[in-house]
Amino acid sequence: MKIISSIDALRDQLRGQLRTVFVPTMGNLHEGHLSLMRLARKHGDPIVASIFVNRLQFGPNEDFDKYPRTFQADVEKLEKEGVYVLFAPTEKDLYPEPQAFRVSPPDDLGNILEGEFRPGFFTGVTTVVLKLFSCVQPRVAVFGKKDYQQLMMVRNMAKQFALPTEIIAAETWRADDGLALSSRNMYLSADERAEAPSLYAQLQAVADEVRGGHLDIFELERAAMAKLAARGWKPDYISIRKRADLQPPSAGDLAQAEPLVVVAAAKLGRTRLIDNLEI
Ligand code: PAF
């Protein structure tokens, strides 16, 4: 595996490749990331991964400085997955100017859910993804469904900017007890780690109710948040949304069995976890 930090060297290395498949990450790779690499292999060749902890997508009071950086261990994992190039730019390599031009996501998707609780987050994500795409020029890129809104945002951006990159979604990788794998899980204490699967358990309970015909979604959301709060969580939201655009379903949508997803974000101690489940 070639480890490349400069944009020019990356372009030289990938010149002439027409089927590049790309998996962007912020490192601290776990089994969930590796499942993205395995899915990538089915959709193109060579596989290019990136590791870049993107300051632009962190708020001033968020965990940019303490975000886990485990570069050597990550390199070994990517080598085993047959990754051809690891693009690992420094901030100076990627944002030398600094990055004054930024992507401005639409309000109806950018300012709801994660966007409401993490102002500027999707500007940061879409800006770095657009820039990484410009560097790698992939035909296909793989994103995990755990970041459901991010996946939709990247898909919509690729479509609206007519980017020549097809976006593939990978299923969420879960521990045996249901907890979605995330780099932030390592912030959890042993007690918090034992409690953490109850976020997914609440999503399953909500999904079961909806599937069983309980369509008072406001009441379902309220009850699920209250249950988490009673267990010591601080929920930002648990929300039933339309899969198509992440807007709340109308009574008509519910009557017509519009495909739904329940999305959630909640803090356990100092760790903020997100998860979702398609209904
Ligand atoms: O999901 C992530 O790890 C990041 O948001 C991404 C897509 C690599 C952009 O920094």
Image: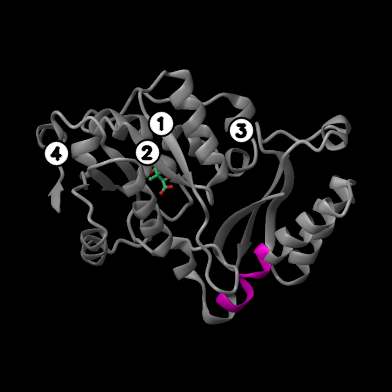
Would you identify the image quadrant in which residue 206 lies? bottom right
- Circle 4 residue: 6
Residue 237 image point, x, y percent: 70, 50
Location of residue 35 (image quadrant): bottom left
* Crowd rating for badge 4 (residues with CA inside 10 Å; few <14, some 14–19, many 20+): some
Residue at 27%, 46% (x, y): give it: 50
- Disc 4 is placed on an element classified as loop
Q: Are marks 2 and 1 in contact (CB under 8 Å)?
A: yes
Q: CA distance from mark 2 to mark 1?
A: 6 Å
Q: Position of residue 84 (x, y in %)?
A: 18, 49
- Residue identifier under label 2: 141
| Mark 3 Cα-neighbour bin, 10 Å: few <14, some 14–19, many ≥20 | some
The residue under the point 23% across, 52% down is: 83
Q: Out of 21 and 160, give the one closest to the viewer.
A: 21
Instruction: Name the residue at 59% across, 43% down.
Output: 114
**Rendered view: 107 above or below 55:** above
Q: Looking at the image, tell me whether mark 4 or mark 3 is earlier in sequence order.
A: 4
Q: Are marks 4 and 3 in contact (CB under 8 Å)?
A: no
Check the image and name the residue furthest to the bottom.
190
Q: Which residue is mark 3?
A: 111
In whole angstroms, how far apart are the C-alphas of marks 2 and 3? Answer: 24 Å
Query: Which of pointers 4 and 3 indicates the residue nearer the eye?
Result: 4
Q: Secondary structure at mark 1?
A: strand
Q: Is residue 204 left or right of residue 77?
A: right
